[in-house]
Amino acid sequence: MAQAAPDDEGWKHGGWLGGQGIPAPSGPHAVGCVDVMHLFEGETLGLLARLFYPTDRDSAARYPYADFCPDMMYYKGYFGFKKIYRPVSTVLGRLFSSLGQFKTPALYGAPFIDGLRPRPSQLPASNASGTGDGIPLSEFKPRGEEEEEEDKSEEERENGVAAGGSSGPESHPVVVFSHGLGAMRTTYSAICSDLASHGYVVASVEHRDHSACVSLRRVPVLGTHGQQYEDAWLEYYHLSPGEKEFPVRHRQITQRVRDVRQCLDLLKLLNDGTEIHDMMESGFDFKQFRGKLCLEKAALMGHSYGGATTIMSLMEDQRFKCGIALDCWMFPIHRDLYSRGVSQPLLFINSYEFQWEENVRSMMKLAKPPDENGHSTCQILTIRGSNHFYQTDILFLLPFFLMRTNMLSQTDLTTAHQLNQDVCNLFMRRYLLKDPALQGRSPNLDGGPGHSTDLIFGTNVAIGKSTNEKGSTPSAKL
C-alpha cells in the first residue's frame, strides 16, 4: 500500500533490524520519480528506467513516497543473487513484500518542477564531516525572478543552465546512472534522489543483460494489439561451474553500453516532446519535460559493474561530458580498449575495503595530463572505512543482509554517503556545469587545507612497493 508523504517535518523512514533508512536528499528541492519503459524501433525489450527529478515541495502532501522494490519479484531476485536456495528466496520475497515496503525519498508521479530556483552561489559544495567548500542548507532563501536573472552569467543566459547543480528556469542537466551486478533501477535511490534535489534529472537504467537481480519485461496481452501488457521477468544469469567469466561479462557490458546510450536517446525524445509509448501504463504526463532538459550537459555515473559501463560508454559516446565511476570493477573492460582512453573528465570514488592492486592499476591506465587549470581530469579518491555497498541503499535498509559476508561499513553510513554526494556535486559543477567558482582549487576535489579527513586522494591499496596513503594498506577484498 502506498504511504502518504509526511508534512513539513520531512522525510524519515527506517529500515529493518538496525537499518536507519535512506537519508533525506541534501538539496533545496523535493524529489519526484516515475518509471518509464519505452520500446525503440527494432527492439524486442523496452528500455526500462526510473526517472528522478526535482519537484515542488507542495507535492509532498499529495503524492506517495515511492516503494524501494516495485514488485515482490525484486526481493526474490536480491536473495537469489546471494545464492539463497530458490524456494527459500521465494518465501523470503513474499515475507518482505507482505510486511510492508521500504520507502525512498522520492514522490512517485509528482509533477516535474515548475518554479523558481535557488541562487546558484548558495548551492552546497561540501558540508560532509564539517569541512567547507559550501554553506549550511539552512541559508537557502526563496528568490524572485528579477534577482535570479541578475545573478545569471552571460553563459547561463545563453544556454539556460544555471551553475551550481541546480538548473535555471529553462533547462536541467541530466545524469544517466548504471547499476552494479545483482542490483536494479532503484538500488541507488539515495544517490539519485540527492542529485535530483540539486536540480539534475537522473535516469537510473535497469539493464537487460541478465546482470540485474531480476528485470521487468512487459509483454503484450494476446488480442489487445499492444494496448495492454502483462509482466514477465528476465532473471539474473549465474555462471555455470567451469564457465569462463570474461566472455560473459564482456558480452553483457556491450548490451549495457547500448542501454545507457538508449537512455540518453530517451531523454532526447522527452526533451523534444515526442510522444512515447509508455509500456508501464503509468498515466504520467511525460510532455512536462519538453524543452526543459539540457542534453548538452549530460553526465554518466555507475557503481561497480556500472562503473565499467560508465567508462566504456564514455569511450563510445561523446554526448556524455563527464563520468563518475563508483567503486569500479574494471574486469569486464577488454585490455585492448585502454589504448583508446577516455577523453572526458573521469572521477573514480573507491571504497576502502573492495579494491585490489590489479583493479587499481587498470584505473591508472586511464590517467592523462592535467587540464589548463592544473586539475587532474582522471582522478582516484577513496573514502576511509567504507565498503563496496555503502554507495547502494542496501546498508541503509537491510544491514543484516550482509552480516554473513562481514561487509558492514566501519564508517558512519550517512557521513560516507554525504561525502560521496558532495564530491560528485563538486566534480559535476566543475566539469559539467563549468561553474567559475570551481575552476580554482577545491579542498574535497584537489586536496589541501580544509579537505575532509575521511578522504584519501588516491588509493589505500599498495601498488608495488609504494602506496598513496601513509601507514598500513590492508588487503583489498572482493
Image: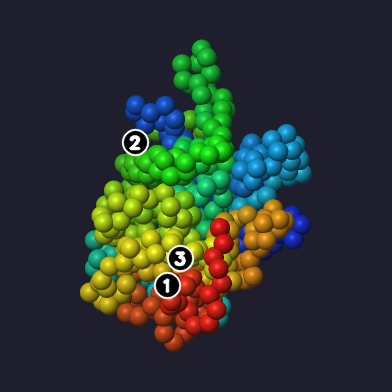
Q: Which mark is residue 274?
A: 2
Q: Residues within 10 Å of mark 1 (few under 14, many from 20)?
A: few
Q: Which mark is residue 464?
A: 1
Which one is earlier in the sequence, the residue at label 1 or at label 3?
Answer: 3
Q: Residues within 10 Å of mark 2 (few under 14, many from 20)?
A: few
Residue 41 appears left or right of 412: left
Which one is earlier in the sequence, the residue at label 1 or at label 2?
Answer: 2
Please name whichever residue, 291 or 114, is drawn nearer the observer in this view of the structure: 291
User: What separation in Å lies between label 1 and label 3 (alpha carbons)?
Assistant: 8 Å
Q: Residue at x 64, y 61 (%)?
A: 407
Q: Where is residue 26 drawn, in percent x and y?
A: 54, 66
Q: What's under tag 1, amino acid-wise?
A: Gly
Q: Label 3, on which residue?
A: 357
The quarter of the image holding the C terminus is: bottom right
Q: Residues within 10 Å of mark 3 (few under 14, many from 20)?
A: some
Residue that lies at the very extreme toward the top in this rendered image: 223
Q: What's under tag 3, amino acid-wise?
A: Glu
User: What separation in Å lies between label 1 and label 2 (alpha carbons)?
Assistant: 54 Å
